[in-house]
Image (cartoon, rainbow, N blue to C red):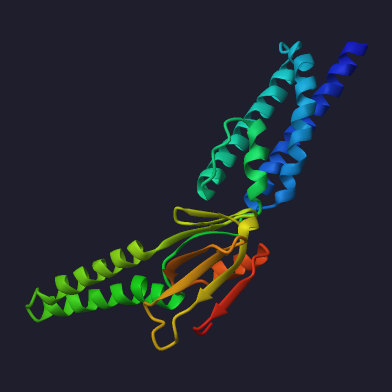
Amino acid sequence: MGSARIRLEGRLEQVEAAVATVKSVRVALHRGVPESLARLPQVLSSLEELLPQVRRHRGSKEVQAALRALRLETEGLVADSRRIAGWIGVPLPRSVHEVCRVLTPHYPVRMNALVMGTPVELVALLVVFPVWCVIVAGLSVAIGSLQAGPVVVGFWLLSVLFCLKRAVRVTVTESVLRVDTREFALSDIRRVEVELPSWMSQRGARATVRIESQRGGRTTIMMPNALGSFIKALRQSGVRVAQTGGLW
């Protein structure tokens, strides 16, 4: 075996190792493991030196297969990263070289959800109420009256629309808190005060969230009374949260 062939096989092994690393980064991203991104810059740097030498032998089927596998994994990583970036509301990476820069400041993502209501309220609205509507509509048909059924169904639809209108999209990443269109750097937050409605008025009531900056400024936001995950995510990110009122 010639020395040129030996060198080519060594370079192909390096490409295959890079493919395996990119693949593992993709898997780790979906699992929310931030350390996975740290391996990417070194791999990309080594590929910049390696690929021109490998491409000289692009007539080789082994080289073609290795380059194809690398292209599929890097394109897949960019596509995955763009979906994640869009999901958490940050600029989309345009190439594999931007993946680390865009996502690293925000990993891990501790919360990204639409806050609508407490579990009991959602079960009542999405399960119990529709079943009750069906029963009422059936009884209306049975007794020959078609008025009650549409009224009840219409009331249910209005209730769903009301919940959706009051819903708030909340994102908590390693560096940012975003509540709908309002964004706060976690490093700029001194504390968050969450005032929950009393247990007498808990059902359907809204919670008051006050975000205090390091400079003393305050932002008050009204949110659905279902903030257990929100409070937990903030505390995991190192934000001081003072909670008053309510029963959890």
Q: Residue at x 61, y 30 (%)?
A: 95
Residue 73 makes an appearance in the image = no
In the rendered image, the residue lying farthest to the bottom is 200
Which quarter of the figure is the N terminus placed in? top right
Q: Position of residue 8 (x, y in %)?
A: 84, 17
Q: Is residue 14 above or below residue 21?
A: above
Q: Is residue 216 left or right of residue 237?
A: left
The residue shown at (34%, 77%) is 128
Residue 225 image-quadrant placement:
bottom left
Q: In this picture, is 105 found above or below 124? A: above
Residue 154: percent from the left, percent from the top? Answer: 19, 68
Q: Position of residue 88 (x, y in %)?
A: 53, 50
Please state the horizontal and vertical placement of residue 189, each as a whole percent of the image.
61, 61
Report whether residue 192 is seen. yes
Residue closest to the eye, 196 or 8: 196
Above-or-below relation of 70 to 77: above
User: Which picture quadrant has residue 64?
Assistant: top right
- In the displayed structure image, the side of residue 62 where residue 95 appears, left or right: left
Residue 196 lies left or right of residue 126; in this view the side is right
Q: Residue at x 64, y 65 (%)?
A: 239
Observer-nearest of 177 and 247: 177
Pick whichever, 119 or 23, lies toward us. Answer: 119
Indicate the quadrant where residue 26 lies: top right
**Across the whole image, how many numbered discs are drawn on residues?**
0
